[in-house]
Amino acid sequence: MNRIPQIFLLIAFATGVALIPVLTSNEYILRVSADTMLYVLLATGLNVAVGWAGLLDLGYVAFYGFAAYLYAELASPHYGIHWPLWATLSIVMGSTLLLGYLFALPSRRLRGDYLAIVTLFFGQIFVTFTTQGYRWDWLGLGSIHDVTGGPTGLTQVDPWRIFGHELTQVRDYLWAALAGFVVISIALTFANRSRTGRAWRALRDDPLAAEVMSMPVNWMMLLAVAVGAGVAGYAGAINGAYYQGVFPTSFAFPTLITVYAMVILGGAGSLPGVVVGAVLVNVTLEVLRNPDHSRWVFYVLLLAGLAAKIRPWRALAAVLGGVVAFGLVVHAIVGAVWPRGTAGPISSGIFGFTTHGWLAVALRHWLVLPKNTYEVANYQIGNVAFITLIALLLTLTVVKGVWRFVLLVPTIWTAAFVWETRLIEESPTTRPLLLGVILIVLMTVRPQGLLGTPRVEIT
């Protein structure tokens, strides 16, 4: 990937995204594409501070939210202000960049965990302010003002209007986000190759050595946070118009974790990497909304992980054969002792179950699925199995040699049992859980991410 000029990668990516509305009119696909482009912008901005400058900024999403709220207040009936797009966009991006600078100013001497704690509180303060901002008393004199709309947020936000054309379709904001990303990525590429970019990387690798070499470390830190905030400002302005409203829950901690996962998965410090990470994470999260799709993701990842880690190949074949045999034996024993214990269906969707299809037949003859247990949401068996799975995983970390392979057999079967009986129907739980597993495996195999480069460690 590094041998391919980034301009070619940018052209290929921009062309592919721009053609999505031409190739399909499916509203769901278009919305997922537009959401993904917003995440691409956010990951690109966060990469400046985290990937290039090495700053652990946990308040980044607050810049995104600040820009969205500022745009909504300047282009909605909330204050009766309906400024033109170019004036509003300039004010939003400029104000967000300035906020990033002012935010980093008092914490410019902090590094690592200390910076993370300060920035985390900043993000939490923003969520609290936006949630309680419908009763803001500016001077403490009892004069209450509604600044943020409170938990219900601000609605009826004006759409973008470019050269007389009002952006009302999802595809319009997909193209707007793409156009902004192209401009921003080109500018950041030049910045990364300049003296400023080299100074950022020196700051990331060793702040003390950079300072000894007379680099303005504090200024470089302020600049990195401000530039990243400016990119988030553009994404926030699109957010307010695209969703036609802004709400506090959109800028809470889970959003920050998702964006960080994108940067880490793709490779912090690599602009193509964070783009790939944003696309993979958001598309994977959407795929996991459907139980049938998430089932395939689970088993494919399970098999891929086993194939990657178990050597020699005969050991892998023995483990897989043992897992199949173990499931068939358990199924036969339970079926003989408790016929109802093997008569249950498998989940085929939200509150949907089936006993048909080759995969359903295979799983029902391999796992133990009690009848009527899942239709009435009686998850007690699944909860017990979940605790058992945790105990097996902890035991795997301490056993050695052939006993590890032996213990791996019931562990894999129990994991599949827990997945089918407890987790597959709970999309809000399973989506971040599977994403976390993917990140853990990747960080174990390739700590620098998919397209990242190893960090320089000076000891």
Image (cartoon, helix red, strand yellow):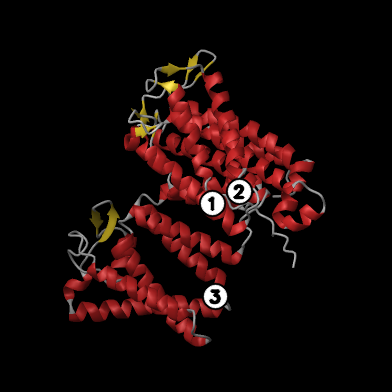
Crowd class of label 2 (few under 14; some 14 to 19; many from 20; radius 10 Å): some
Residue 43 shows in this picture: yes
Asked if the residue at tag 1 contacts the one at tag 2, i.e. Cβ–Cβ closer than 8 Å, the answer is yes
First in sequence: mark 1 or mark 3? Answer: 1
In this picture, is 42 found above or below 356? above
Looking at the picture, tell me which residue is in the foreground, 134 or 309: 134
Q: Nearer the viewer, mark 2 or mark 3?
A: 2
- Helix, strand or loop under label 1: helix
Q: Residue drawn 18% across and 66% down?
A: 371
What percent of the width, then of the height, locates residue 417? 33, 69
First in sequence: mark 2 or mark 1? Answer: 2
Q: Residue drawn 20% across and 73% down?
A: 341
In this picture, is 205 found above or below 363? above
Residue extending farthest right? 213
**What's the amino acid at mark 1?**
Val
First in sequence: mark 2 or mark 3? Answer: 2
Indicate the quadrant containing the C terminus: top left, top right, bottom left or bottom right.
bottom right
What percent of the width, then of the height, locates residue 109? 65, 51
Asked if the residue at tag 3 contacts the one at tag 1, i.e. Cβ–Cβ closer than 8 Å, the answer is no
Crowd class of label 1 (few under 14; some 14 to 19; many from 20; radius 10 Å): some
Residue 33 shows in this picture: no
- Residue 340 is drawn in which quadrant? bottom left
Crowd class of label 3 (few under 14; some 14 to 19; many from 20; radius 10 Å): some
**What's the amino acid at mark 3?**
Ile
> In the shown orientation, is residue 38 left or right of residue 53?
left
- Label 2 sits on residue: 107
- Label 1 sits on residue: 118
> In the shown orientation, is residue 332 left or right of residue 79?
left
Q: CA distance from mark 1 to mark 3?
A: 42 Å
Q: Residue drawn 48% across and 21% down?
A: 160
Residue extending farthest top? 164
